[in-house]
Every structure is written in structure tokens, then in C-alpha cells.
Image: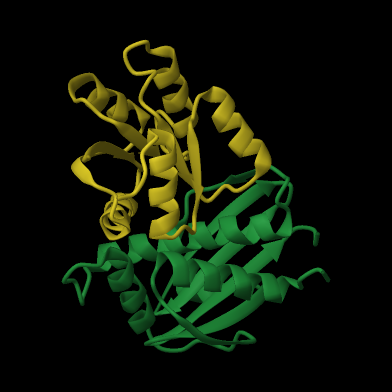
């Protein structure tokens, strides 16, 4: 099964890297949307069906915390799992993001396998 | 297990980041030496459980190598802007990894990494370490307002 992914990060280089790692990992992606912050991500979600969101935390305008909160508060979007991708490995931050509604958390640096496993976990699928 | 020294933390964190996220093997590490030639550097500040600054200074051929490995594809010679973005992202990831090694429980706020004059990366009070990679060197400078 192929998945529609939304990558949210203010760095175009980082977005390209996450997309590349998804390809390397063997995770089956049918469509890969991108957004530079939470506001752009909400615009993408308003117009496109997405299966999973991968988001950074520190971004201008609408950051990752606000994005997770907005998705969680929107009945149409609440079922879309959000996986946080961040350098912040502190327990407090991870707990905070999970309390807001994130379903997964991947700490940079991460390997392609770690990213794939976390996506499969939140989507409830196993790797073929 | 004995606590790691700051130099050991710099080496371990940077090696982990370079090898895992930038697909760039580290061949060795030394005390930081005076850099020469074309250089690229990025710095960010952090506050919270610890307060200070982390800077990354990379020799230009090594910066291009890291950027090409990170971006992937057919790009042997990535655009200069992309090389700068990648080195800024390297500084961001190394800083996050160093801080989680030093205090995994504390909350930290990190500023956005910015490119700086490479010769301003070092300060006399900084802990520093140089890692050797294909094409050149990566040097880390960590300044802490108070040592952990």
C-alpha cells in the first residue's frame, strides 16, 4: 500500500532530505506534499488527502506545536497521524508533543530504518 | 559508566550525526587546530538547561562533500546556497545531539542556525574538537556559560 505524505519543515534542504530518506527506507510513498510551516501545512491539508504528516517543531509563523494542536482540534483531520521529526530529544518536549496529539516522534539523527519503523507503527502497517 | 568529557561528547555526537544523517564517515578526531584555506561556518545559540553557543567550521571541500552526501542524487557539486543550508542544518543537529548528551532531561530553546564569518567561529573559552572526513575537516566549538 502506498501512502500520501506531507513533510513540514522550514528548510527546503531538510524537506528534500526527509523525502530522500523515505525513498531509501523502502516506505511506499504515492504522493509527497511539502510545506514550509504549519500555516502552509494546514493549507495543504485543506486541499489534499494525506495519510501521515511529518513535521519539524521550530518553524516561523505557525510552529510544529501549533500545527499538531490545530490538526488535533479539527474533526476532519484528527485521524491523520502526525510524526514529529526533531533534534530535541528531551523527555519534556516529547511528552508535550504527544500530549498535544502527535502519534510519533523521530529524533535527529535517525536512520532510514528508524523513520520507516515509526511511520509503519503509527499507520498500523507492517513492512513487506 | 563514567561521564563523558565535553570533548568526548563533541566527538561522539558529531560522529553520530555525520554518519547517520549525512552519510559521511568520520576517519578520526583531534584537538582543534588552526584552520586554513576556504572555510564555511554556522553558529546557533541555546538556552534552557544550559546556555551557550555551538559553532561548526568546515573546510570548503568537506562542506561540499557533506552537502552532496546529504542532498543525494546526481549532485556532485551542490549549489553554494544548498551547501550553506546543509552546514547550518549540520550545526542544528549537532547542537541538539550534544545537548541531549549533556542533559537529556532539560528543556532547551535553540536559535535558528546562521552562517557566520568562519574566522569568528572560535572563542578562547570554547571547548573544541576537529573531526577528519573525506575531503577535509569539521571543527566544533562549544561555549557554555556554565559547565554542567
Rendering quarter of residue B140 = bottom right
State the image coordinates of residue A107 (x, y, percent, origin top left).
52, 50
**Drawn side of residue B96 relative to residue A117, left or right:** right
User: Quarter holding the N terminus of chain A?
Assistant: top left
The residue drawn where x is 48% and y is 32% is A103
Q: Position of residue A115 (x, y in %)?
A: 41, 51
Q: Is residue B95 left or right of residue A16?
A: right
B35 in relation to A1, above or below? below
Q: Can I make out residue B116 in this image? A: no
State whether residue A77 is above or below residue B64. Answer: above
x, y (%) of residue A88?
57, 47
Relative depth, front residue between A52 and B115:
A52
Instruction: Find the residue positioned furthest to the front.
Output: A128
Q: Which chain is green?
A: B
Q: Colour of chain A?
A: yellow
* Way the structure is coloured: by chain
Question: Left of A117 or right of it: where is A76?
Answer: left
Residue depicted at x 62% and y 79%: B129
Q: Residue at x 53, y 82 (%)?
A: B131
Q: Outermost residue, right direction? A: B2
At x 32%, y 57%, the residue is A25
Q: Nearer the viewer, residue A109 or B30?
A: A109
Give the answer, above or below, for where A80 lies relative to A12: above
**Residue B135: percent from the left, percent from the top?**
37, 87
Query: Is residue B42 something that shows in the picture?
Result: yes
**Going by the image, does A127 lie left or right of A93?**
left
Q: Nearer the viewer, residue A6 or B6?
A: A6
Residue B39, picture quadrant: bottom left
Which of these two is toward me, A50 or B65?
Answer: A50
Amino acid at each position: 500500500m502506498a501512502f500520501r505524505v506531507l513533510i513540514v519543515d522550514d528548510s527546503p534542504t531538510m524537506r528534500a532530505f526527509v523525502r530522500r530518506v523515505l525513498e531509501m527506507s523502502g516506505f511506499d510513498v504515492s504522493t509527497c506534499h511539502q510545506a514550509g510551516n504549519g500555516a502552509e501545512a494546514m493549507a495543504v491539508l485543506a486541499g489534499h488527502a494525506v495519510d501521515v504528516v511529518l513535521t519539524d517543531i521550530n518553524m516561523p509563523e505557525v510552529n510544529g506545536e501549533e500545527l499538531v494542536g490545530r490538526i488535533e482540534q479539527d474533526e476532519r483531520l484528527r485521524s491523520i497521524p502526525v510524526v514529529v521529526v526533531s533534534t530535541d530529544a528531551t523527555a519534556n518536549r516529547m511528552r508535550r508533543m504527544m500530549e498535544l496529539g502527535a502519534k510519533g516522534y523521530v529524533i535527529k539523527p535517525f536512520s532510514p530504518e528508524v523513520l520507516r519503523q515509526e511511520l509503519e507503527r503509527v499507520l498500523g502497517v507492517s513492512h513487506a | 559508566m563514567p561521564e563523558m568529557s565535553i570533548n568526548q561528547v563533541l566527538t561522539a555526537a558529531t560522529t553520530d550525526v555525520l554518519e547517520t544523517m549525512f552519510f559521511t564517515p568520520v576517519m578520526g578526531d583531534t584537538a582543534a587546530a588552526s584552520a586554513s584555506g576556504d572555510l564555511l561556518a554556522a553558529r546557533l545559540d541555546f538556552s534552557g538547561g544550559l546556555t551557550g553557543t555551538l559553532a561548526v567550521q568546515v573546510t570548503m571541500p568537506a562542506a561540499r562533500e557533506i552537502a552532496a552526501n546529504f542532498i543525494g542524487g546526481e549532485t556532485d557539486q551542490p549549489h553554494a546556497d544548498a551547501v550553506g543550508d546543509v552546514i547550518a542544518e549540520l550545526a542544528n543537529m549537532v547542537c541538539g545531539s550534544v545537548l541531549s548528551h549533556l542533559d537529556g532531561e532539560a528543556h532547551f530553546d535553540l536559535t535558528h542556525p546562521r552562517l557566520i564569518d568562519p574566522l569568528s567561529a572560535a572563542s578562547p573559552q570554547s571547548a573544541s574538537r576537529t573531526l577528519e572526513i573525506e575531503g577535509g575537516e569539521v571543527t566544533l566549538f562549544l561555549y557554555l556559560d556554565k559547565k554542567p
